[in-house]
Image (cartoon, rainbow, N blue to C red):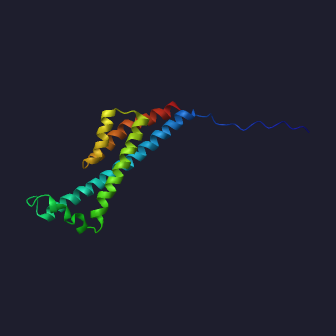
Amino acid sequence: MTTTPASPPATPPATPPATTDRAKSLASALTRYRVMAWTTGVLLVLLTAHVVMQIVQHGGLSGGWGPVFEEKGIDVVVPGLGHGVPIAHGWMYLIYVVVTIDLWLRTRLPAFKTALVVLAGTIPFMSFVAERWVTHRVRPMIEAARAAG
């Protein structure tokens, strides 16, 4: 009895790695950006609430700016946040800038609008608006990269 050599196992057609890698790269960069935009935005809203509470606790601005920032601010509501929120927002904003630049390098969105997206992390609630704008522009790029593969 003779046996025939086994044929090699069938392999599925491979997608071009560059296109697949580009889609994954864009998707992961967008996810990083969205997480940092929301994190920065939430921390900025907390920081704004902290500063407003300090002004209110001081009795308004009639006494000048000097002693306003000596007030407890948000520490009255949640002890420890008065020092943690400004520091956390500062560090998260730096990461937000780096992640935004990374996304820009991958997508080549307009440079001026990307600069506005970076600045959105300094205006309360604007990082949420910028996140939606960026997401609506990058998702079609991801889909096009997937379709090309």
The location of residue 1, given as percent across then percent down, is: 92, 39
Q: Nearer the viewer, residue 6 or 45?
A: 45
The location of residue 52, given as percent across then percent down, is: 18, 58
Instruction: Tell me: 6 left or right of 2.
Output: left
Q: Is residue 148 above or below residue 1?
A: above
Quarter occupied by residue 49: bottom left
Residue at position x 7%, y 59% in the image: 62
Residue at position x 30%, y 51% in the image: 41
Residue at position x 90%, y 37% in the image: 2
- Residue furthest left as drawn: 62
Instruction: Tell me: 17 left or right of 133.
Output: right
Q: Nearer the viewer, residue 77 or 146?
A: 77
The location of residue 18, given as percent across then percent down, is: 54, 33
Quarter occupied by residue 111: top left
- Residue furthest front as drawn: 66
Instruction: Tell me: 46 left or right of 20.
Output: left
Residue at position x 32%, y 42% in the image: 118
The location of residue 57, given as percent across then percent down, is: 15, 65
Q: Nearer the viewer, residue 43 or 17?
A: 43
Instruction: Tell me: 55 left or right of 21.
Output: left
